[in-house]
Amino acid sequence: MLDSVLLFLGAQEIILIVLALLLLFGGRKIPELMRGMGRGIREFKEGQKENPKESPKEELEENKQ
């Protein structure tokens, strides 16, 4: 999903977003925020690997019980 969003953003939009982030959070806070976001994404991916998707039929049966 993120890849498809980045395809529609041009250089001007990306620069504008970066400048807005700098103004809102300051230069020192951004690396800390990105590090936290990276950890969250990593944990999410690990959680997906540990719990493979169940089929919709299995989910419906579990909800009925």
Image (spheres, rainbow, N blue to C red):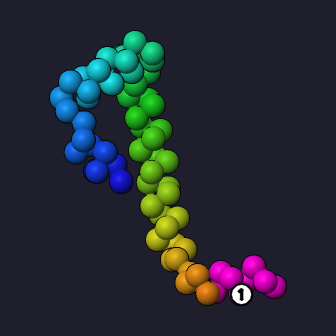
Towards the viewer: 29 or 16? 16
Helix, strand, or loop for circle 1? helix
Towards the viewer: 36 or 54? 54
Q: Position of residue 21 (x, y in %)?
A: 39, 21
Q: Residue at x 78, y 83 (%)?
A: 64
Q: Position of residue 61 (x, y in %)?
A: 71, 87
Q: Is residue 41 magenta?
A: no
Is residue 37 depicted above or below 63 in this figure? Answer: above
Left or right of residue 19, residue 11 in this image: left
Q: Residue at x 31, y 45 (%)?
A: 5
Magenta span covers which residues? 58-65
Q: How many marks?
A: 1
Which quarter of the image is occupied by the C terminus? Answer: bottom right
Q: Residue at x 37, y 18 (%)?
A: 20
Q: Residue at x 45, y 51 (%)?
A: 41
Which quarter of the image is occupied by the N terminus? Answer: bottom left
Q: Position of residue 37 (x, y in %)?
A: 45, 41
Amino acid at pointer 1: Glu
Is residue 45 depicted above or below 25 in this figure? Answer: below
Q: Is residue 63 magenta?
A: yes
Main SS of the magenta segment?
helix
Q: Residues within 10 Å of mark 1 (few under 14, many from 20)?
A: few
Towards the viewer: 59 or 51? 59
Q: Give the quarter of the image for residue 24.
A: top left
Left or right of residue 29, residue 9 in this image: left
Q: Give the quarter of the image for residue 30.
A: top left
Q: Position of residue 63 (x, y in %)?
A: 75, 79
- The residue under label 1 is 61
